[in-house]
Image (cartoon, rainbow, N blue to C red):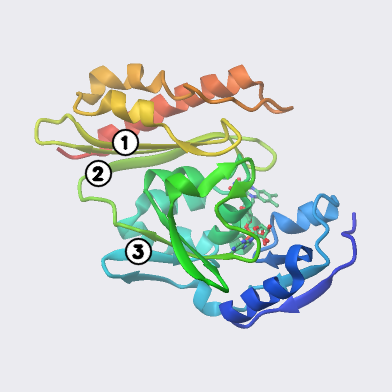
Amino acid sequence: MFPASFEYHRASSVKEALSMLQQFGEDGKLLAGGHSLIPMMKLRLAQPAHLVDIGGIRELAAIREDGGKVIIGGLATHYAVEVSDLVRAKLGMLSGCAAVIGDTQVRNRGTIGGSLAHADPAADYPAAVLALEGEIRIEGTAGSRTVKADEFFLDLMTTAVQPGEMLTQVAFAPVAAGAGFIYVKHRQPASGFAMVGVAALVTLDKKGNCERVRVGITGLGPKPFRAKAVEAALQGKAPAQAIAGAAAHAADGIDALSDIHASADFRAELARVYTRRALETAASRAKA
Ligand SMILES: Cc1cc2nc3c(=O)[nH]c(=O)nc-3n(C[C@H](O)[C@H](O)[C@H](O)COP(=O)(O)OP(=O)(O)OC[C@H]3O[C@@H](n4cnc5c(N)ncnc54)[C@H](O)[C@@H]3O)c2cc1C
C-alpha cells in the first residue's frame, strides 16, 4: 500500500522544525522514527501534505544527566534507551520497558518522543513514564512548557501536545535506592504491543511496609493512567498481605477497550492479574 503524495522536508534544528510546522498548519506532521506514522499513512489513516523529518536533529537524541535528573531527548530510540548505562543505572524500569517494545527493527527506529506523542493506547512507554512520574517538555514557537506524565495523556491518541508543538525531552528523577520495579505486559503476539502492560514501582519503609507505590497501566483503556486506587490500597501496608486486594482495583472506573484481540472483560482481568504480578515482583525486589 502506498501513502497519498506528500512533500518531504528535513529540519536541522528544533527552531526550524517548529517554524515549518507553523508554516504548514494542519497539513504538516513531524516524522521521527516513522514506525507509527508511516503505517498510518500507508493505510491512508493519515494524509499529511507535508512531512517534517526531525530525524537529523542529533541533539534531540541525547540521553544525559542535568540538575540531578535524567533527561532523555525526544528523538532517543527505544534501543538507545534500552542500552544506555545511565538509564540502566538510574531508571532501570525504563530500559526494561524499552527492551520489550516491538522487535529489533522497531526498537532501532522508533523514538520515545514519537511513542509518547502518538499515544497509541497499547504503547508500552506510557505505563513506565507514568510510574516514574516523568516530566515532558513541549516546545512551540511561543515558548516551552513542562507537563507531568499524569496530565499528558488526554484521550485515545490525544496528548497535551498541541498542533504546531513538539515534544523535545522527558525528564525523570532517578529511582530511589532500594526501590523495586518492573514493567510487565501481555503481548499481542504479532506486533508485541501491550494488550495490557503494567509498570510498578515500590519502596519500603524500615518495617517493610509500602512507603511509595506507583502503578502505570497501558492497553486497558483509551489512554494510559496511574492506578491511584491500587497505589492508595497499598500505602503503609505490608505487601504480602495487601497486594492481592490492591490489584483488584486495577480496572476500577476504566472504560476497558474491546477489539479483535481481547474483550473489555478479558482486558480488565488481564489488568488485575498483571498488576498483581508486577507488584509482587516489585515488592520482592525492594529493600527495606
Ligand atoms: C511492527 C510494529 C510493532 C510495534 N510494536 C510496538 C510495541 O510492542 N510497543 C510499543 O509501544 N510500540 C510498538 N510499535 C510502535 C513503535 O514503538 C513506534 O516507533 C512509536 O510508537 C512511534 O515512534 P516513532 O519515532 O516511530 O514516531 P513516528 O511514527 O515518526 O511518529 C508518530 C506520531 O508522533 C508524532 N511525533 C513524532 N515525534 C514527535 C515529537 N518529538 N513531538 C511531537 N510529535 C511527534 C508524529 O507526527 C506522528 O503523528 C510498533 C510499531 C510497529 C511498526
Percent x, y of residue 171: 39, 61
Ligand 1 within 8 angstroms of badge 1 C-beta: no
Q: Are marks 2 and 1 in contact (CB under 8 Å)?
A: yes
Q: Are marks 2 and 3 in contact (CB under 8 Å)?
A: no
**As drawn, 250 above or below 166:** above
**Which residue has dot 2 on it?**
179
Label 3 SS: strand
Neighbour tally class for label 3: few under 14, some 14-19, many 20 plus, Cα within 10 Å = many
Label 1 SS: helix
Left or right of 129? Residue 175 is left
Q: Amino acid at mark 1?
A: Ala
The residue that appears at 61% across and 40% down in the rendered structure is 121
**As drawn, 22 above or below 257:** below
Q: Amino acid at mark 2?
A: Ala
Mark with earlier residue (1, 3)? 3
Is residue 124 visible to us here?
A: no
**As drawn, 191 above or below 107:** above
Q: Amino acid at mark 3?
A: Val
The label number, if any, that marks residue 70 in the structure image: 3
Percent x, y of residue 142: 54, 72
| Identity of the residue furthest to the left in this view | 206
Mark with earlier residue (2, 1)? 2
Left or right of 98? Residue 65 is left
Left or right of 80? Residue 122 is right
- Mark 2 vs mark 3: give the one in front: 3
Instruction: Tell me how far mark 2 sits from mark 3, CA to CA.
Output: 17 Å
The label number, if any, that marks residue 282 in the structure image: 1
